[in-house]
Image: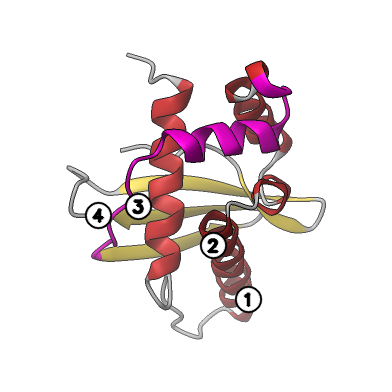
Amino acid sequence: MVASPIGRSVTLLAAIVACAAVSGCGSDDGSDKDAAADRAAVRSVYGKMRTALQKGDGTTACSLMVVRTQREFAKLGEAVGGTCEAGFATLLERVDERPPTPTLVAIEVDGDKAVVTARTPTSKRPQRAPFIRERGTWRVSNWFRD
């Protein structure tokens, strides 16, 4: 069964806020300085996304997404402009409460791909969100999913 864009967006919003709310998303064993730097960069994107969500700043949030994800948000905002920012605003209007804080978060990096795993009290199992290094910058790649 394919989730609706709104359902996927709410899940993405929940996971972004949840991960950003936990200090030290991921762990650093110091064995690979490049991987540690990449984990820190992914963690930074979460922090920026969290701030954007708190402020309702769709411009910043959309700038942190890969083009494909921006297009998904634009579909949500078709009735009010068809931009990622309009979709982001539409999503925020439809969310009644802020997502819960996770109990476990990890960041795994493999080259130009990363996966953030988060567990919240309301998730049946950990949720995973892929990131891609696009034009040298880590960006949210896809929806969080169980």
| Quarter where residue 42 is shown | bottom right
Residue 135 position within the rendered picture, expressed as x and y whole percent measured from the top left: 82, 51
Residue at the spot 64% in from the left edge and 16% down from the top edge: 79
Q: Quadrant of the C terminus?
A: top left
Give the magenta range.
80-103
- Which is nearer the N-term, disc 3 or disc 4? 3
Q: Choose mark 3 or mark 2, whichever is in front.
A: 3
Determine the CA span between mark 3 and mark 4.
12 Å
Residue denoted by label 2: 46
Residue denoted by label 4: 120
Residue type indicated by callout 2: Tyr
Residue at the spot 23% in from the left edge and 65% down from the top edge: 103
Residue denoted by label 1: 37
Q: Is residue 60 left or right of residue 45?
A: right
Along the line of sight, the residue nearer the viewer: 119 or 99: 99
The image shows residue 138, relative to residue 77, as above or below, that is below
Along the line of sight, the residue nearer the viewer: 110 or 136: 136
Determine the CA span between mark 1 and mark 3.
30 Å
- Which is nearer the N-term, disc 1 or disc 3? 1
Determine the CA span between mark 3 and mark 2.
16 Å
The image shows residue 91, relative to residue 101, as above or below, that is above
Along the line of sight, the residue nearer the viewer: 34 or 102: 102
Residue denoted by label 3: 98
